[in-house]
Every structure is written in structure tokens, then in C-alpha cells.
Image (tube, grey):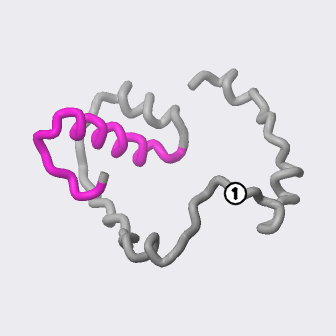
Amino acid sequence: MKKSDMKNTSETDWDMIDSLTDETIDRTELPPLDDSFFARAKWRMPEKPVAVTIHISPDLLEWFKAQGSEYEQRMNAALRIYALAHKDISLSSV
């Protein structure tokens, strides 16, 4: 991400978003959450991340850090994408 990208402003009308209430949100295209939905639903809790120490190239670390404060989550996502692309490993949570 370039520094100039941070100067772009959002075109979202936040005042309109803040004014929405449950009654004013159009849900006509959403399927109902009936008993059959909840019968199929599964409770999933994310696994607690494991802290590890790894050696990576300084430029790679700096690139991830430049992407924002949640760079560790981005690194985890990149590793997951790589692992899923190679499908030699079984991953419990996708």
C-alpha cells in the first residue's frame, strides 16, 4: 500500500448508515432464520493461535508490517492460502 492511498476518502454516507434502525433495513432478499436453519447450524469457536518464533527475511516482514497493524493475521492468512493451494495438509478450520 502506498502512502498516497491513505489520503483517499471514503464515499460512504456514514450519517445515513448511522441513522439506520432495525425497522428501516430491507431484509426482503434474506432467507428466514427458521428452525431448519438452526437445526443445521454448528457452533464454531476459532482456535487460539499458537505463538511461534520463525526466521523470515527482513524485507518480507517490513512488507507485511506496511500493510497495517494486523500484519500477523495477514501472514497467517497467506500461509493458510499457500497450504490450501497445496492441499497436502489437512486444516481443521478453513
Q: Residue drawn at (29%, 57%), measured in percent from left and top?
A: 93
Q: Is residue 1 left or right of residue 51?
A: right
The answer to whether 28 is drawn above or below residue 38 in the figure is above
Question: How many circles with numbers are drawn on the protein?
Answer: 1
Q: Quadrant of residue 2?
A: top right
Residue placed most toward the observer, 7 or 21: 21
Q: Is residue 91 magenta?
A: yes
Q: Residue drawn at (32%, 60%), measured in percent from left and top?
A: 49
The answer to whether 71 is drawn above or below residue 40 in the figure is above
Across and down, in percent, residue 75 comes to: 36, 41
Q: Residue drawn at (21%, 52%), measured in percent from left and top?
A: 91
Q: Is residue 67 magenta?
A: no
Q: Quadrant of residue 33?
A: bottom right
Residue placed most toward the observer, 19 or 5: 19
Q: Which residue lies under the disc numbered 1?
A: 28
Q: Is residue 5 left or right of residue 87?
A: right
Report the quarter where the N terminus lies: top right
As shown in the figure, which amino acid type bears the numbered disc 1? Thr
Point out the stretch of residues depicted in magenta. 69-93
Q: Is residue 70 left or right of residue 10?
A: left
Q: Residues within 10 Å of mark 1 (few under 14, many from 20)?
A: few
Across and down, in percent, residue 43 comes to: 38, 73
The answer to whether 67 is drawn above or below residue 54 in the figure is above
Residue placed most toward the observer, 75 or 91: 91
Q: Is residue 30 left or right of residue 83?
A: right
Q: Residue drawn at (36%, 69%), measured in percent from left and top?
A: 44
SS assignment at label 1: loop
For the stretch drawn in magenta, the main secondary structure is helix
